[in-house]
Amino acid sequence: MRLLAIAALAVTVWLVTATQVPTHVRLPVGSVVVGAIITQPFGCSTLDLEPFDPLCPWHHIHTGIDLAAREGTEVHSATGGIAFLGFDSAGAGNFVAVAVDTHVRVLYCHLAAFRVVQGQAVTPGQVIGLLGATGLATGPHVHLQVNIDGRPVDPAPFLDS
Ligand SMILES: [Zn+2]
């Protein structure tokens, strides 16, 4: 009986995983802003303006990847999900947060303009905004951030997997 229960559980897990695959398309980082230059990767940073992290040698962490390109360049969603719009003058500027599921959120920050509305369902590759330098930004770029349960992870391996 115990073996059967385990087998049934395995099938359930497989079914749940299989049915989630079509909605979990992840396009690579390079497809978010075509032709962009990565000016700062994810991880520990020497820049004082980045958030505090006691585990980093210089006590600051860059919580995403910076993709620099010309102001007004189209910004594409790497995933499907529900778009939430926000503004943070002291940080992200105009940003779109795409909720992929209850755990994963992908943030696109410093946008010059939005191309989606609050609560809109987006598909992978859809244009969600235009690249800009709103909020705390020294030049036009997208700060691309992936949060899993609120904790930033490196977007490169997450999206390119
Ligand atoms: Zn950044």
Image (cartoon, rainbow, N blue to C red):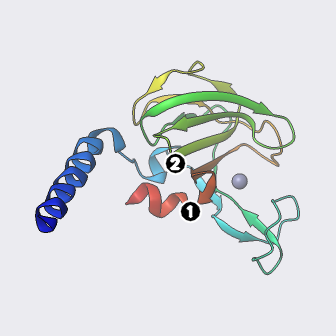
Displayed quadrant of residue 59: bottom right
Q: Is mark 2 within 8 Å of ligand 1?
A: no
> Which mark's residue is nearer the viewer, 1 or 2?
1
Residue at x-position 73% and y-position 43%: 140
| Type of the residue with mark 1 | Asp
Q: Which residue occupies 20% across, 59% down?
A: 10
Q: Is mark 1 within 8 Å of ligand 1?
A: no
> In this rendering, would 128 be left or right of 8?
right
Please give left or right for residue 21 compared with residue 26 in the image: left
Report the residue marked by disc 2: 35
At label 1, counting other C-alpha atoms closer than 10 Å, the crowd grade (few under 14, some 14-19, many 20 or more) is some
- The residues tagged by marks 1 and 2 sit, at their Cα atoms, a distance apart of 20 Å
Give the residue type that dot 2 points to.
Gly
Q: Which residue is mark 1?
A: 154
Q: How many marks?
A: 2
Residue lying at the far top in this picture: please name it.
Answer: 117
